Amino acid sequence: MASSNSGAASTTERSYYDGDVDFDVLAEQDADFAAICRVSKDERWIDFQNPKVVQQLTKSLLKCDFGVSIQLPDDRLCPPVPVRWNYVHWIQELLDTTSDTYSDRYDPEREVIGLDIGVGASCIYPLLACSSRSSWRMAGTDIDQHSLSYARKNVDANGTSKRIKLAHTTTDSPLIPIDALKIEELDFLMTNPPFYSSTEDMQASYTAKTAPPSAVCTGAENEMICPGGDVGFVTRILTESLELRDRVQWYTAMFGKISSLQIVVAKLKEHDITNFAVTCLQAGYRTKRWAVGWSFGDYRPRNDVARHGELVQAVLPSPTAQTISVPLMDSKWAGEKVDEVIGELAVKWRWRANLSTGLMEARENVWSRSARRKRKFAEEGGKGPSNDVTMGGGDGEGSEDEDDDDIALAVKIVCKSEVVELRWLRGSDYVLFTSFCGFLKRALTSKA
């Protein structure tokens, strides 16, 4: 981890961990960590095969980077902090870029409720979420009473008992016990499920690796193994999500293998779930994890969030951004042309000339040649089609009785020197987005 990631916990805008831990910086900040370090040839290092040393690394990172303190039993998983934080931060970006404000930024006033399925003894995900976002609350579940007892101690020790609620579940309980928790809706759920389907599966995974494990594993069997492994676990969540649908905005899960991600993405496509996001959560040079999130809503995450990290083409969702090149044209010219072209459409259009930025919302495709001919015919006194819908012209206000649920496409347009950037904000139809992009490109690049 880069040394810039270790410091006093000003965490609301904390970025991803993107490198190995800087042991020198961490040792300067925390005497307990310095005490477990070894120095050889002026290089500080630690013994990752010693459970107590690994525990102290986790405790020191949580203390120095997030102001969080935890206690861990010797017979349960000790969670590495960097990749856990990267998972939490990715979810934060998912929510920040899929709000009804279209802002793409963190809104400290937005109240968020999340669920961690399988909190473990550390309760690390709820603690990271609440320590970094003051208006967030978390629920957490686990089937292991021993882990829950430690999790509750950690919640109390950090003064978060009013913001983090924990519940015991059983192997027969729903994985998303939203009704049992008396929660009407969730903004997100997350899970770091057991990776393996059996003891043999786990042993085979270790045997297949070309290098030994980077750190000792102290996980109990219920933390490492479940029927079907991580794919089986997340498939259960997917099945439950098909019933709950938009009672949860984002369903997310983390995997230990990219092959698991590939299988689950294929399952999402089988169920015609097109609004999904994927990430490679690399933290350091050896540890990689992968995550997926899916939504039944139509707010689209920013492109670098939906397709985050190093990923194979097969798992990528449809892009939520396009760029139109307008060579030799400055942002003022491009902005005037964009405002003119879109202002003539039957859409809701808000243009900010000082920012060279606009927001377009449409109920249907009104930019096709046939749609524009119908509108022209109607304006010239002909009888327009009975299903012709107008959202207002270029005044940007639309009709007073306009139903927000009728919006089929929302796009943010930013004009810069020699390029126009289009950001897909909302909609269920990728073809509609690309159609609009094509229309605007023709309008901007036509020589006529």
Image (spheres, grey):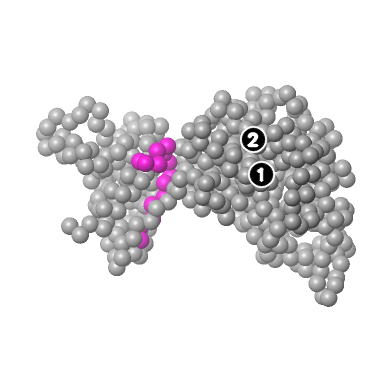
SS for dot 1: strand
Answer yes or no: is residue 111 visible: no
Q: Is residue 425 rendered magenta in the image? A: yes
- What's the residue type where badge 2 is placed? Val
For this orientation, the residue located farthest to the bottom is 41
Answer yes or no: is residue 318 visible: yes
Q: Which residue is mark 2?
A: 234
In percent of width and height, residue 79 lies at 76, 48
Indicate the quadrant containing the N terminus: top left, top right, bottom left or bottom right. bottom right
Residue 360 horizontal side relative to residue 257, left or right: left
Q: Is residue 390 above or below residue 124?
A: above
- Residue at the (17%, 31%) spot, across then down: 384
- Of the pair 109 and 198, the residue shown nearer to us: 198
- Of the pair 64 and 434, the residue shown nearer to us: 434
- Give the CA distance from mark 1 to mark 2: 9 Å
Q: Residues within 10 Å of mark 1 (few under 14, many from 20)?
A: many
- Of label 1 and label 2, which has the lower sequence position? 2
Residue 391: which numbered mark, if any? none
- Residue at the (27%, 32%) spot, across then down: 389
Q: Quadrant of residue 221?
A: top right
Q: Which residue is mark 1?
A: 255
Badge 1 vs badge 2, beta-carbon distance below 8 Å = yes
Q: Is residue 439 rendered magenta in the image? A: no
Residue numbers of the magenta segment: 419-432
In percent of width and height, residue 209 lies at 74, 53
